[in-house]
Amino acid sequence: MNIRKLWQLLTLALINLTLVLTVVADPQKVTGVISDDMCRQKHMMPGHSEADCTRACVKAGSKYALVVGDKVYVLKGDPKQIGEFAGKKVAVTGDLIKGSLAVQSISEEE
């Protein structure tokens, strides 16, 4: 077997392993504040609430994000559902994949 074929088989095996691990991964619950991926922790619209700034940034093309301390996870899911919680502390349950969180459920935290 030549090196090129061996390399292709190894690459396919790694891709399959990644897919299997992604499919069988348990959803995670992450708590943070709903923001957007541009402003993150620092909103830049003086005189507006964090929620208003977040919604305006998303309307302008940013994506909803969950800010957890210094980490920011881009949220994948229904923008209308996520937008209801803009600026609020929430618990998000979903699949965490490469800095993104595929939203399964959101609930407000106190």
Image (spheres, grey):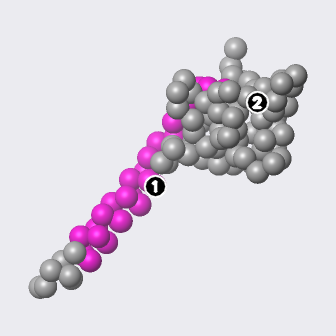
Residue bearing the label numbered 1? 23
Q: How many marks?
A: 2
* Residue 8 percent location from the top left of the image: 26, 77
Q: Secondary structure at mark 1?
A: helix
Q: Depth check: give the residue in front, 45 or 7.
A: 45
Q: Name the quarter where the N terminus is drawn.
A: bottom left
Q: Quadrant of the C terminus?
A: top right
Relative height, residue 36 to residue 98 (above, below) = above
- Marks 1 and 2: which is nearer the front? 2
Name the spot of residue 14 as percent of width and height, x first: 30, 64
How much space separates mark 1 and mark 2, taking CA atoms? 38 Å
Residue 89 in sight here: yes
Residue at 47 percent across and 42 percent down: it is 26
- Residue that carries the numbered disc 2 in the rendered image: 44
Amino acid under disc 2: Met
The amino acid type of the residue labelled 1 equals Val
Q: Between disc 1 and disc 2, whose residue precedes?
A: 1
| Image quadrant assignment for residue 5 | bottom left
| Mark seen at residue 34 | none
Q: Is residue 87 left or right of residue 4?
A: right
User: Is 25 inside the magenta-drawn segment?
Assistant: yes
**Residue 22 location (% of width, % of height):** 44, 53
| Viewer-side residue, 101 vs 53 | 53
Q: Which residues are magenta?
A: 8-33
Q: Is residue 52 magenta?
A: no
Q: Is residue 37 left or right of residue 79?
A: left
Q: Residue at x 24, y 70 (%)?
A: 10
Kindly give the residue lying farthest to the left in the view shown.
1
- The residue located at (54%, 24%) in the rendering is 69
